[in-house]
Structure formats: C-alpha cells, structure tokens
Amino acid sequence: MTFYELLKLFTYISPFLIGTTIVIGICYFKFIKREYQLLLLYLSICLISDIISRIIGVIYNNNLIIIVIFSFFELLFFSIYYQLAFFKRKIWVYTLIATVALIYIAWEIVDLWNVPPSEFQSYSRVISAFFIIAIAINYLFEKIEEKQKQSSLIKLNYAFIIFYSLHLIFFLPINFLINVPSSIKYYFWSANLLLTLTFYVYLGREIWRNGLTQKRLHSGL
C-alpha cells in the first residue's frame, strides 16, 4: 500500500468521527450547554460537505469548489455562533466584516465554479480562518480584562484559536499544494488531516463529557 492510498484510507475516519459526535450530541441534546448544541450544526455542515465532496470528486474528478462553499457556511456559522454563545450580544462590526467576507467568498464560488485544478486559487479558507481567529482572540482579551477564570467557553475558544491558526498555515499555499508534482504535498495534506481529526476528537470528547456531566446533575447523581 502506497502512502497516498494510506492517506486516502485515513480520510474516511473524518466522517466517522463527525457522525459519531453528532449522534452523541443528539443523545445528550437536552442536557448539553447551548454552545455545544449549536456546535452540532457546525459538525453537520462539516459532515454534509465531506459527503458531497466525495460524491463530486468521483463524478467530476474535481471537488475543489467544495472548499470555497464550505468556507462560506463556516464563516457564516462562526460569525453568528460567537455572538450567540460567546459574547451573548450582537456586535455590529463583526456582522459587517463577516458580510463583506461572505460577499467575496460568494463571488469566488461563481468565479471558480468551472476552473480546472491547475488554475484554482482560492482565499476563502484563509479569510474564514483569519476571521475566526480574530474574533476568538478578541473574546479572549475581553475575558482577560474581566479577569474571568477558566471555563468551558474559554477552553473551547482556545481550541478554535489553535486549530484555525494551524489551519491557516496549511491553506495559505493551497495552489502550490494542489499543483506541485512532488510527493511532499501529501505530507502537508496528511498533517492537515491529522490536525482536523484531532480537532474533531476534541469536540466530540467535550460534547460527550458535558452531556454526561449535565445528565448526572439532572439525575441528582
């Protein structure tokens, strides 16, 4: 088995992890905190994007446009998610920035719809990741000023900062990673896959732990 075949096999772990986490979240839905309930929507977006990406890849042998489409829904989700679950208030400047970014990504979707892989150059993942990092860091500074102690929200916020910061590094040279003939690109993609799987495992564990704890509290155990 070649390294490429092994990497392709490992990509099937991703939908399994996401699907398992969604099932766990549904089972504990009435017990888990609001931030975790909303995260199930994000994970559903990830799962649907993953499945559609595989189908389009088989049919058209080019599923790169899904990267841009996923970025659109990812940015849309986090722009609303942070204001609902973290800040718990509407912040117009973030709404405005997110709207401008979404318009640009929507333009990319139209512009890159039929572009061959050799000409594919998207900034959507970079824009989405940068926005999430910026809003997460702003929330962190706000809590530091309030001298708030560690909480599940702050820990979750740290996870977003770490994941999307590393994710940003991987997607900056996306055109190079797609078209470079060297096998080195597979090492980049495998590192990104490992990062993504670790992120999904973390989210799944946090949702499960929160659901189990809250259920025991409701049961008086």
Image: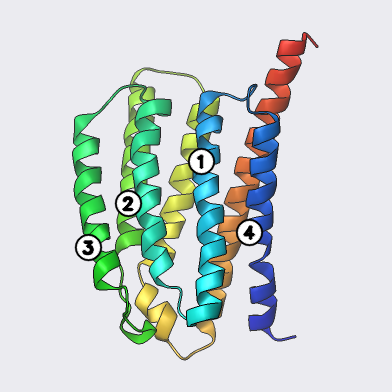
Residue at image location 19% in from the left, 49% down from the top: 100
Q: CA distance from mark 3 to mark 2?
A: 18 Å
List x then y, in percent, for residue 83: 34, 29
Which residue of the protein is positioned furthest toward the right in this rendering? 221
**Considering only order in the chain, which callout, 1 or 3, is on the residue closer to the N terminus?**
1
Helix or strand or loop: what does disc 4 sit on? helix
List x then y, in percent, for residue 40: 55, 39
State which quadrant residue 191 falls in.
bottom right
Q: CA distance from mark 4 to mark 2?
A: 23 Å
Query: Left of 43 or right of it: where is 110?
Result: left
Residue at image location 48% in from the left, 39% down from the top: 158
Instruction: Tell me the residue that label 1 is attached to.
Output: 41
Residue flagged by tag 4: what amino acid is it? Ser
Helix or strand or loop: what does disc 2 sit on? helix
| In this view, the mark in front (1 or 4) | 1
Question: Vertically, is 72 above or below 140?
Answer: below
| In this view, the mark in front (1 or 2) | 1
Residue flagged by tag 3: what amino acid is it? Trp
Q: Nearer the viewer, residue 159 or 149?
A: 159
**Considering only order in the chain, which callout, 3 or 4, is on the residue closer to the N terminus?**
4
Query: Left of 158 or right of it: where is 138?
Result: left
Residue at image location 72% in from the left, 13% down from the top: 217
Instruction: Tell me the residue that label 4 is attached to.
Output: 14
Instruction: Tell me the residue that label 2 is attached to.
Output: 130
Residue at image location 64% in from the left, 42% down from the top: 22
List x then y, in percent, for residue 79: 33, 39
Q: Nearer the viewer, residue 155 or 179?
A: 179
Residue flagged by tag 1: what amino acid is it? Leu
Residue flagged by tag 2: what amino acid is it? Phe
Q: CA distance from mark 1 to mark 4?
A: 16 Å
